[in-house]
Amino acid sequence: MKIGVFALQGAFIEHERAFRELGAEVTEIRCRDDFSGRFDGIVLPGGESTVQGKLLREEGLLSPVRESVREGLPVFGTCAGLILLAKEIEGGEEAHLATMDICVKRNAYGRQLGSFVQKTVVGSVSNFPAVFIRAPYIERAGEGVEILSVVDGKIVAARQKNMLALAFHPELTNDLRLHEAFLRMI
Ligand code: GLN
């Protein structure tokens, strides 16, 4: 299984380690050339969505990635990655890949709850230690979106066809069950 991890900014090394541990072949994607190969799946890591969106545009990656995701390339978006996938960002900020029928709220938990860990059910995975860091949540989801996890009444994980999106950081734990779940989607 060949996984391309976007390595423009953010927590990409940890995703690479997780997928390698599961036996996948991992390549970093930093520029358009890197994206020209064949991938079974791609990963949009956590970090800063505004910076990542800007870099995707500057590297000429935004349109080709959007096209591939629309054509069905499996994508795993975590935290900032979820924001990149969203069709709508609350507050009127310009969307990035805009492939997933969700509206997200950025930095949604306020300052006191900037970072926290919460055990949660994610689809068929129970008791997952979800690490939230200045996390977004999904405010609205379209009909084709399957909601996988709700924490404190807020949607924090969802799937739409080939897109799996989490508001938290599964790569910052030793629990690989959600990385495994993504590989099973491929
Ligand atoms: N706050 C970041 C953003 O809005 C996301 C945080 C994260 O990826 N941990 O892009």
Image: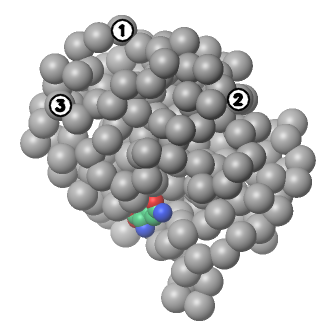
Location of mark 3 (residue)? 31
Residue toward you, 149 or 114: 114
Q: Amino acid at mark 1?
A: Arg
Looking at the rendered structure, which numbered label has been put on residue 26?
none
Which of disc 1 and disc 2 is earlier in sequence?
Answer: 1
Q: Quadrant of residue 131?
A: bottom right
Which of disc 3 and disc 1 is earlier in sequence?
Answer: 3
Q: Secondary structure at mark 1?
A: loop
Q: Residue at x 80, y 53 (%)?
A: 128
Q: Secondary structure at mark 3?
A: loop
Instruction: State whether residue 176 is above or below residue 92.
Output: above
Q: Residue at x 65, y 34 (%)?
A: 179
Location of mark 1 (residue)? 38
Location of mark 2 (residue)? 180
Distance between the alpha carbons at the discs numbered 1 and 3 = 14 Å
Estimate how packed mark 2 is, as few (under 14), some (14 to 19) or many (20 or more) residues with alpha carbons within 10 Å.
Answer: few
Please state the horizontal and vertical placement of residue 172, each as a whole percent of the image.
Answer: 60, 56
Residue toward you, 3 or 21: 21
Please state the horizontal and vertical placement of residue 28, each as a whole percent of the image.
Answer: 33, 31
Distance between the alpha carbons at the discs numbered 2 and 1 = 20 Å
Please state the horizontal and vertical placement of residue 130, each as a whole percent of the image.
Answer: 71, 59
Relative placement, left or right, of 53 versus 140 is left
Q: Quadrant of residue 160?
A: top right
Residue 86 visible: no
Q: Residue at x 43, y 45 (%)?
A: 13
Distance between the alpha carbons at the discs numbered 2 and 3 = 26 Å
Residue sticking out furthest to the bottom: 112
Which of disc 3 and disc 2 is earlier in sequence?
Answer: 3
Q: Amino acid at mark 3?
A: Cys
